[in-house]
Every structure is written in structure tokens, then in C-alpha cells.
Image (spheres, rainbow, N blue to C red):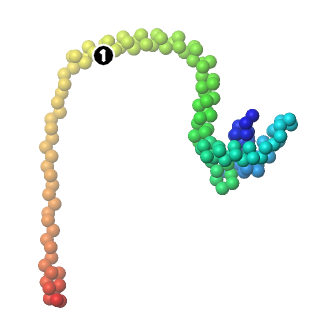
């Protein structure tokens, strides 16, 4: 198992709403690490940083959680893995449906030829003109008298 997969598994199993700290993720991974493998801290840190850079993880202060985009990708991948088993049976049902839709399409053009086009009467639009404001001459006269 890669370090990135271990980080994803640790974040899922810790189920912290605000995210999991780096120390909590590290402790969880070390507890689940096979005994024949040696813990490599530098690999863990680079996997965590590359996950944040690629957008798989979201870092809030010193907490890490899975991004919504990564969750969607993972759910889509799980659906694709289980989908081929279910698709084998529906293929037989799809073929008869196509024949029925073809018959409906032939009936539709006959209806179109019998319908007449109706033109809607045009409405006349009138423009409202706003009355012009009168400029006050009192201000102008006061300015002229002050000079």
C-alpha cells in the first residue's frame, strides 16, 4: 500500500469533521504498517505535500481532510468497478425499446405536415418621454453678483 493510500485510509477511519492532524494520521498509519516494512517519514511528508498540491487533500492550518473533488472521483471509480456486472442484463432490454421509438418517430412527421403555422400579431410599443428639468437661474445670478 502506498503512503497516499494510507493517508486516505487514515483520514477516512479517523472521521474528524474539521480534519485530521498530521500526527494523528502518522500514528494511525504506523499502527497499521506491516511489521516487515520500515517507516519512512520523508516519504510520508512528500506524499502529504503532493496530495495537497494535486488537490486531493485540503489543508486547514495543520489539519488535513479529503477534498470534495477527490471524494467524487473515488465514488465514480467505485461505481465503474461494480457497473460492468450490472450492465450485462440491461443490454437485452435496450434493444426492444429502440424498435418502439422508431415507430413513434414515423408517426411524428405526419402530424407536422397537417399543422399550420400561426403568426402572432405584433404589439405596438410606445416610448415614454421623461419631462425635462428646468435649471434654476437663481444660483447663476448669485454667483454672478459675488464676483
Which quadrant of the rendered structure holds the C terminus?
bottom left
Residue 99, above or below 57: above
Query: Foreground residue, 49 or 5?
Result: 49
Lateral position of residue 94 relative to residue 133, left or right: right
Q: In what element is the residue under mark 1?
A: helix
Residue 54 is situated, as x and y percent measured from the top left of the image, at 60, 43
Residue plotted at (15% across, 81% down): 140
Whether residue 12 is visible: no
The vertical placement of 26 against 91, above or below, is: below
Q: Determine the image quadrant of residue 78.
A: top right
Which image quadrant is residue 51 in? top right
Residue at point 60% right, 19% down? Answer: 84
Between residue 105 and residue 59, name the one nearer to us. 59
x, y (%) of residue 20?
A: 71, 48
Nearest the viewer among 42 and 138 is: 42
Residue that label 1 marks? 108
Residue 54 visible from this viewpoint: yes
Q: Where is residue 19 in the image (x, y as percent from the top left)?
A: 68, 49
Mark 1 closeness class: few <14, some 14–19, many ≥20 residues within 10 Å:
few
Identity of the residue furthest to the bottom in this view: 146
Q: Nearer the viewer, residue 120 or 21?
A: 21
Q: Is residue 67 left or right of residue 98?
A: right
Q: Which residue appears at 72% of the width and 42% of the height? A: 7
Q: Which corner quadrant holds the N terminus? A: top right
Vertical position of residue 92 compared to residue 21: above or below: above
Residue occupying the point 63% across, 24% down: 81
Amino acid at each position: 500500500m502506498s503512503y497516499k493510500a494510507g493517508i486516505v485510509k487514515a483520514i477516512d477511519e479517523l472521521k474528524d469533521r474539521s480534519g485530521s492532524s498530521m500526527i494523528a494520521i502518522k500514528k494511525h498509519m504506523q499502527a497499521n504498517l506491516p511489521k516487515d516494512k520500515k517507516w519512512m517519514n520523508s516519504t510520508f511528508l512528500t506524499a502529504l505535500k503532493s496530495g495537497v498540491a494535486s488537490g486531493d487533500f485540503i489543508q486547514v492550518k495543520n489539519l488535513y481532510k479529503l477534498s470534495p473533488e477527490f471524494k467524487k472521483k473515488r465514488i465514480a471509480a467505485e461505481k465503474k468497478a461494480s457497473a460492468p456486472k450490472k450492465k450485462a442484463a440491461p443490454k437485452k432490454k435496450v434493444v426492444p425499446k429502440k424498435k418502439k421509438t422508431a415507430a413513434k418517430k414515423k408517426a411524428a412527421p405526419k402530424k407536422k405536415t397537417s399543422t399550420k403555422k400561426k403568426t402572432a400579431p405584433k404589439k405596438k410599443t410606445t416610448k415614454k418621454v421623461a419631462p425635462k428639468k428646468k435649471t434654476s437661474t437663481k444660483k447663476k445670478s448669485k454667483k454672478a453678483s459675488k464676483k
